[in-house]
Amino acid sequence: MTSPRRFLALASAFFVLPLALAACGGGVPGNAVVKIGDDTIKQSTFDHWVKVAAQSQAQQSGQTGGVQVPDPPDYKQCIAQKAKSAPQPAKGQPKPTEKQFKAQCEQEYTSLRDQVMNFLISAAWIQGESHDQDVKITDEQVKKEFDQQRQQSFPKDTDYQQFLKTSGYVQEDLLYRIRVQDLSNKLREKVLKGKDQVSDKEISDYYNKNKDRFAQAERRDLRIVLTKTEDKANQAKDALKSGQSWKSVAAKYSTDQASKDNGGVLPGVAKGQQEKALDDAVFSAGKGELGGPVKTQFGWYVFEVTKVTPRKQQSLDESKATIKSLLSSQKQQKALNDFVKDFQDKWKDRTECKSGFVVDNCKNAPKKKTTTTSTVPPGAAQTTQNAPPANSGGTSTNK
């Protein structure tokens, strides 16, 4: 079958359209795992995506055959499967216990549950915010993009059908994934619109406050000989004074292999790049002056400054394009950061999760000293950033 890697790029996160209108009132209904405002994500939707996630992880690990989702709270089937497939322990080593198998099952289920819950919630938030901001994407646009990506990854329909069969996806999953991704991108565009404008005064002010950033430091071209002892350094210096060439002296005395092979040449040295004792000596010496020996942690140096390239300050005009790009990026990033904070606060406050399905994105999650969220809000970054590998989003609420 044709490799599905490119197609899995569009199937790389749990972005769905899982909301079903629920009656107003407090608490999460019995057939749901989370309530967001007056809408819910159903248990059946969650179950579908847990199976897809488990199938994806199994494929990546090379597992073949039927994939079984760990079965909380007792994990009886999972424990039995692990006991059956566990390799024989090495001689003298004990067999894994049922308690150990159960701990593995619980860990696997918790990981799947948290991935699915975070991305189901994330998708719902993106769709809710898109509705509030009147950001839309048509069915025709979604289908066109889907067809393009499908054709690139699966020129043969038989390969595509095999992909659906082995992955656990249905086509609606992939279509919804594209829809929510595009909504996220459009939200980002709306947040950033007009936020890249930078005035000439802002550019000038930044240049005047940061002139050193737009200057090229003085550089010096050197010839050096590095020796292990002061005596050897003095011998090398005397040889140079006697008229012997740097090439011959470096070849005979230098232990610095990088420079000795080209006559001791060390070009374009800026202040602060060398060990301090050598740096101080080099930048206080005059051009053509034979200096040293200078003791450093690497040995003893004899040197000569062969060329001095003075410090050069870029003008405001020369720096303008760079500063404009920098300030524009800073303004856009601030706009995104401000939006993301409001977005997360707004939607987390509307999100209540059922006991046993609580993740950080739920308002009833345990309080933490440092509040973080794994949700990738629209505009903060590509919405696939924290997605489990090779999983997509989008399923009917009637699953």
Image (cartoon, rainbow, N blue to C red):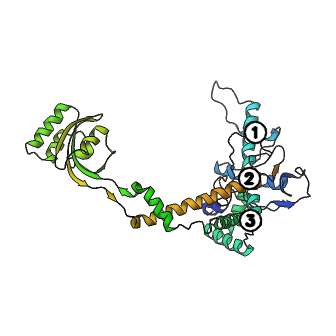
Label 1 neighbour load within 10 Å: few <14, some 14-19, many 20+:
many
**Quick one: label 3 or label 2, which is nearer the N terminus?**
3
Q: Find residue 256 and report its horizontal and vertical position in percent.
A: 25, 41
Numbered disc in front, either 1 or 2: 2
Distance CA(mark 3)–CA(mark 2): 16 Å
Mark found first going from the N terminus, 1 or 2: 1
Residue at 73% across, 51% down: 118
Earlier sequence position, callout 3 versus callout 1: 1
Mark 3 surroundings: few (<14), some (14-19) or many (≥20) residues within 10 A: some
Q: Residue 368 in the image: x percent, y percent?
A: 72, 40
Do the residues under discs 3 and 1 have CB atoms within 8 angstroms? no
Circle on res. 130: 3
Q: Are marks 3 and 2 in contact (CB under 8 Å)?
A: no
Name the residue rendered at 71%, 57% in the picture: 167
Q: Which mark is residue 106?
A: 1
| Residue 277 showing in the rendered view | yes
Residue type at mark 1 is: Glu
Mark 1 lies on a secondary structure that is helix
Q: Name the amino acid, label 2.
A: Asp
Q: Nearer the viewer, residue 84 or 390?
A: 390
Splitting the image into 4 quarters, where does residue 328 fall?
bottom right
- Residue situated in front as seen by the camera: 193 or 38: 193
Q: CA distance from mark 3 to mark 1?
A: 36 Å
Residue 384 in view? no
Q: Quadrant of the N terminus?
A: bottom right
Label pair 1/2, CB-CB below 8 angstroms: no
Give the secondary structure at mark 3. helix
Q: Who is closer to the viewer here, 307 or 298?
A: 307
Which part of the image, by quadrant, shows the C terminus? bottom right
- Give the distance between the C-alpha atoms of the residues marked 1 and 2, in whole angstroms: 31 Å
Q: Which callout, 3 or 1, points to the residue nearer the camera?
A: 3
Mark linked to residue 345 = 2
